[in-house]
Amino acid sequence: MTYRETLKNCIDELSSVGVPDPESDARLLLEEASGKDYSHLLMSFRDEIPVEVSDKLNDFVSLRKKRIPLQQIIGYTEFMGLKFYVTSDVLCPRQDTEVLVEQVLEKINGGAKVLDLCTGSGCIAISIAKLAGVSVTATDISEKALAVAEKNARENGVSVYFYKGDLYQALPSDEKYDIIVSNPPYIKTDVIETLEPEVKDFEPRIALDGTADGLSFYRRIIAGAGEHLKPNGLIFFEIGYDQGADVSVLLAGSGFSDISVIKDYGGNDRVVTATLKR
Ligand code: GLN
């Protein structure tokens, strides 16, 4: 069988079970199985596919047909132009979250100290440390997530101070930060069951579940922010498309001003930023 025929079969198999983007997934799985990028694959399209490559691809395709996320199958993804390892212990870094990092990068000053809460794969903390060259501290309650984050920091050649524990409780000192950033779990518990199988069945519940109203992490992070932010410190949250007003109200009620809600590239509200005036 040629590469071309194999790719076609792979697309058919993925679409037969309703995988959302069969063409792009098939292409990425073939790139990974063959170790060739798409332009090299195009040049080999009429060649016979080596048996090791087709065996590997078949394994990938059977996992993907079970709706295991592509990033968990190949083991990594790209975020802010950097490579991040992904396992089933972390939320897969999403493109929407790049808007959050871009907002931080726009407002950050050299020498700023940044705190990332619920770091997961570390994608936010590590991109800020790498792209702004500042000191970043990050916490997460999951030891397994922190192991992934530490590997990601190492592989990207940055040092981030990682601590395990519940939000601020994980921090070893009462040091204050210029910026707090977080993409906490924010999905309403009842909504999780309505999400795609990739998310509801294979991503860590603990990284998704924002309790009954989806807002509990915002409440707890905002409640502790006064103690951990320097005067005029900034806070940046990723939010769900319908949470802009609720999170703005919570911030206003705790002394934050200059509150703004920013959209992602899909046109949905995605980020809230605010300043703690003192
Ligand atoms: N901060 C990580 C991310 O943005 C993990 C977020 C989470 O687990 N809710 O990908």
Image (cartoon, rainbow, N blue to C red):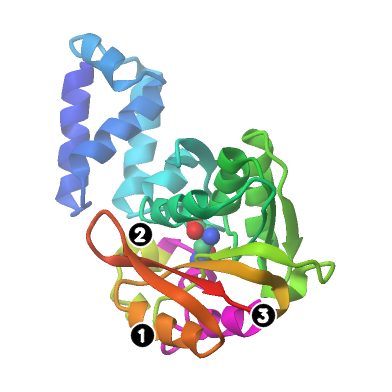
Asked if 6 appears above or below 167 in the picture, the reply is: above
Circle 2 residue: 198
| Residue type, numbered disc 3 | Gly
Q: Is residue 149 left or right of residue 50?
A: right
Q: CA distance from mark 2 to mark 1?
A: 17 Å
User: Are dots 2 and 3 in contact, CB under 8 Å?
Assistant: no
- Dot 3 lies on which element? helix
Residue found 67% across the figure and 53% down from its top? 112
Q: Please identify the quadrant where the C terminus is shown.
A: bottom right
Residue found 52% across the figure and 47% down from its top? 86
Badge 2 or badge 1: first in the primary sequence: 1
Q: CA distance from mark 3 to mark 1?
A: 31 Å
Residue found 67% across the figure and 72% down from its top? 231
Q: Is residue 128 left or right of residue 264?
A: right
Q: Residue furthest front?
A: 278
Asked if 272 appears above or below 64 in the picture, the reply is: below
- Dot 2 lies on which element? helix
Q: Give the image location of residue 106, x and y in percent.
A: 47, 50
Q: Is residue 238 magenta?
A: no
Q: What secondary structure is the magenta-colored segment mainly?
A: helix
| Residue type, numbered disc 1 | Asp
Q: Is residue 204 magenta?
A: yes
Q: State the extent of the magenta-drawn residues as a range.
A: 202-226
Crowding near pointer 1: few (<14 within 10 Å), some, many (20+)?
Answer: few
Task: Residue 190: give its label.
Answer: 1
Circle 3 residue: 226
Q: Give the image location of residue 155, x and y in percent.
A: 64, 34
Q: Please identify the quadrant where the N terminus is shown.
A: top left
